[in-house]
Amino acid sequence: MNDALYLDYNASAPMRPEVLDVVTNILAAPHNASSVHSYGREGRRIIEQARSDIAAIINVPPAQLIFNSGATEANNTVLHHFAGEKIAVCAASHLSILDAAEHLVHIPVDENGLTDLTALEEILKTEAPALVSIMLVNNETGAIQPVTNISALAKRHGALVHCDAVQAIGRIPVDINALGVDFISLSAHKIGGPQGVGALALGLCGITPTMLRGGGQEKSARAGTENVAGIAGFGEAAKRADMDQYQSLQKMRDDLETQLSAISPEIIIHAKNAPRVAGTSMFSLPGISSETLLMALDLEGIALSNGSACSSGTVKASHVLLAMGASEDVASSALRLSMGWNTTPSDIEHFIESWSKIYERLKDRIKTHA
């Protein structure tokens, strides 16, 4: 069993013990929810209960929730539906949006990673996109986008709105009606559920984007045998998501950033002046590469990342920070620390102790670089 200190919840939260019990128990039975026998009927019951539990946390009718393999599939499904039309996407979006389609128009962001609403309005006027795609919470910086304002602006110009809410559920309120969006992408493993299962929620626009065909599952909206155990785990994780507990991480995050700045004055804390979710901090130590810092922390038994964990284990300059106007050097020296349901103050103390030792070893490189 890996006993490293885990501070990479935005990549994948550890599975909650209650979720593991649910998934393990259901895996033991041959539940194919399309079958008419007792195992099939039980599988269907499990799926529909989970559908109701997940739909409740985003205030959408259960019938408007389609299960799939995760947010990457959901994002691709929506953007592929609008293939051949112009799509406006936030420049700081996840790569599962930025690389999902052609004819993308990038909406610039400011130095805090927030969407430039003036630029968006100009894009809506001049480019007339059919769809605007926006992340509610950025996976790297934790910045919270003004999705309600973005949606209202898009609707005035006749565009539909897709919202990747993967990093938002369980952390801040997510209400499909209050946000005014037409499609919401969700994923289980960010909230302590299993990997490989997610959902696409549909608003009232009357469109059901479909990418996988060849079966009647999910009301013919997504072909393929449902992952009954994974879906059940997603439902259990949704029931146990505790926003109050997550909000309590803000003090730890703020104390962390205060101590980091005191130990290493050169540090840059990204999106510090933007509204952020409580458990995310992204910072750079210019002159020291992310790879060097990650290796040093790994030797200290600490697991975190330099940003998105969806690049096959590679360490690259953060495209999010580059979109925010950061230099290549700053974007190449970034780390993301993210906390969640099992993080404790002693974990942050451990990290700070290790960071102090690492900084003492490397600080001469910073001076040389400067």
Image: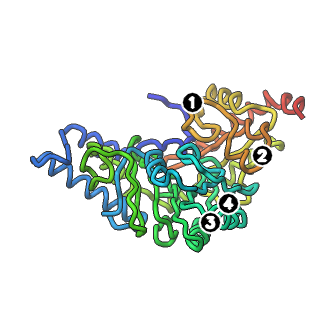
Amino acid on which disc 1 is placed: Gly
Picture disc at residue 326: 2
Which numbered disc covers residue 313? 1
Does residue 81 appear in the picture of this structure? Answer: yes
Disc 4 element:
loop
Mark nearer the N terminus (1 vs 3): 3
- The amino acid sitting under disc 4 is Thr
Q: Is residue 43 above or below residue 65?
A: above
Q: Is residue 192 visible?
A: no
Q: Which residue is mark 4?
A: 115
Badge 3 density bin: few <14, some 14–19, many ≥20, Cα 10 Å: some
Determine the CA span between mark 4 and mark 2. Answer: 16 Å
Q: Nearer the viewer, residue 19 or 78?
A: 78
Point out the image quarter for the N terminus.
Answer: top left
Labels 3 and 4 touching (C-beta < 8 A): yes
Question: Is disc 2 surrounded by few (<14), some (14 to 19) or many (20+) residues within 10 Å?
Answer: some
Disc 3 is placed on an element classified as loop
Q: Position of residue 84 (x, y in %)?
A: 52, 51
The C terminus is located in which quarter? top right
Label 3 sits on residue: 146
Q: Residue at x 49, y 42 (%)?
A: 12
Mark 4 or mark 1, which is nearer the start of the sequence? 4
Q: Residue furthest left?
A: 37
31 shown above or below 303: below
